[in-house]
Image (spheres, rainbow, N blue to C red):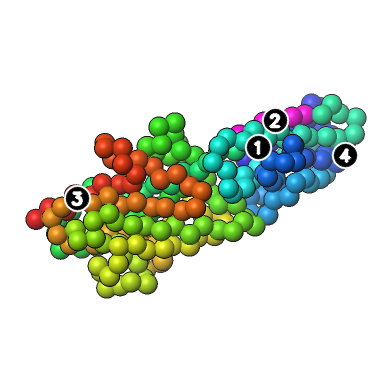
Amino acid sequence: MRWMSTDGGMKNSSAGITRSPPRFRTTISASNATTAGAASFTVHLNNLQTNVPFYVHGLEGFTSTQVVTIRIQAPGFTDGTAVSNIVQPGIDISGLLATGAAAAADDPFQVRWGLPNAQNTGLNSLQALRFGGPGLTVTVTTTQPTFGNIVNTANSPAGATSASPVAQGGGSTTTPISVASGGVAFNFIAPGIAFVIPTAPGFIPMQQSQTLQDGFRVTVTP
């Protein structure tokens, strides 16, 4: 979220917000986080009102940083500008046990998305999917299904498959917290080591293990 501000307050005027250059596919929306974005919008400010929030939506499909200038214009005021960097988002796993015994109860966990750190080992912050966008389908896979499988409502009972897709819409920052609500869980089967890897188109899987392999390392004990 960003704020548009003025010096001394607007005089019953309207301010327009646009983004440039047009070839960069980013959108901005008005004063709430649940409105689909547009290339520009106009908002009215009353006397003595000095600021109004707005939200920048980064669109899908970028694998390198894109720099976008946000321009604010109002009659009688000098234009204001702000810069947003649109970067490729990351995806990681939260709440999964690093160690569990074979035949232990299924362990529910969540997949999260947001701003990755410089090392791609974790997320600096979670960021919600934009409203008006295509949503996100996350596929969770285990590298060693003989040691442990991924369970969701579509493939119960436990151990039916090694990959489970989960679809999410605008406003969400994670997959659901339980299998019953549409999320996923890890099923401990036999002693060994498996990496649980979340993937989604255009997202970078975080390397959450000391071996710097994509995904989250799970050790299944006897």
Whether residue 56 appears in this view of the structure is yes
Q: Magenta part of the protein: which range? A: 80-85
The residue type indicated by label 2 comes to: Ala
User: In whole angstroms, how far apart are the C-alphas of marks 3 and 4?
Assistant: 63 Å
The answer to whether residue 82 is magenta is yes
Question: Viewer-nearest of labels 2 and 1?
Answer: 2
Asked if marks 4 and 1 touch (Cβ < 8 Å), the reply is: no
> Which residue corresponds to the image point at 77% horizontal and 45% vertical from the top-left?
40
Within 10 Å of disc 1 (Cα), the crowding (few <14, some 14-19, many 20+) is few
For image coordinates 67% across by 49% down, the residue present is 32
Residue 2: x %, y % from top left = 65, 37
| Label 3 vs 4, first from the N-terminus | 4
What element does badge 3 sit on?
A: strand
Residue 129 horizontal/vertical position (percent): 55, 52
Mark 4, residue position: 13
Dividing the picture into quarters, in which one does residue 158 lie? bottom left
Secondary structure, mark 2, is: strand
Q: Secondary structure at mark 4?
A: strand
Q: Which of pointers 2 and 1 lies earlier in the amino acid sequence? A: 1
| Alpha-carbon span between mark 2 and mark 1 | 9 Å
Q: Does label 4 or label 1 sit earlier along the sequence?
A: 1
Q: Which residue is mark 1?
A: 2
Contact check, label 2 and label 1, Cβ < 8 Å: yes
Q: Position of residue 146 (x, y in %)?
A: 19, 61
Circle 1: residue type? Arg
Q: How many marks?
A: 4
Front residue (pair 7, 105): 105
Q: Which residue is mark 3?
A: 193
Q: Amino acid at mark 4?
A: Ser
Q: Quadrant of the N terminus?
A: top right
- Rendered-image quadrant of the C terminus: bottom left
Residue carrying label 2? 82
